[in-house]
Image (cartoon, grey):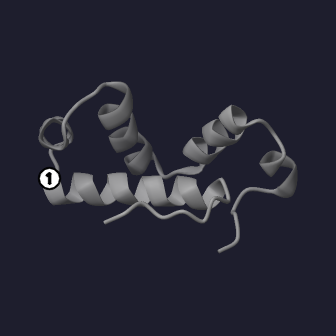
Amino acid sequence: MSPRLPGDVRRLPLRVRLAAAIERLPESQRLVLALRLLDGLTTVEAAGALKLSVLEVESRFTTALDLIADDLGSGVRRAA
């Protein structure tokens, strides 16, 4: 796996790299991530707020976490 962020960004502090990785996510994934992690909503609550199925929220959340891990170059995938 190769990181998607440019080399100069990969050398920045982790907090800056994390913010850049989150910014690169599609809006639909950023929104799910924000509702779950920042607002503290459960998957069911986020699904209701977004008028999505629970499975779609879970999918977007998992994909967002995987993309962030790839961007940060950790190579660590979230356990299923």
Quarter of the image for residue 47 reads top left
Q: Is residue 53 left or right of residue 36?
A: left
Quarter of the image for residue 45 reads top left
Quarter of the image for residue 31 reads top left
Q: Nearer the viewer, residue 34 or 80?
A: 80
Judged from the image, the secondary structure of the residue bearing numbered disc 1 is helix
One can see residue 53 in this view: no
Q: Is residue 65 left or right of residue 55?
A: right
Q: Nearer the viewer, residue 11 or 61?
A: 11
Amino acid type, residue under disc 1 in the picture: Val
Q: Which residue is mark 1?
A: 54
Residue extending farthest bottom: 1
Image quarter (top left, top right, bottom left or bottom right) of the C terminus:
bottom left
Count of numbered circles on the image: 1
Q: Residue 34: give x, y in percent of width and height.
A: 39, 34
Residue at 14 percent of width and 53 percent of height = 54
Residue at 30 percent of width and 36 percent of height = 36
Q: Residue 67: give x, y in percent of width and height.
A: 52, 59
Q: Residue 52: give x, y in percent of width and height.
A: 17, 50
Q: Residue 19: give x, y in percent of width and height.
A: 62, 36
Image quarter (top left, top right, bottom left or bottom right) of the N terminus:
bottom right
Residue at 38 percent of width and 27 percent of height = 38
Residue extending farthest right: 8
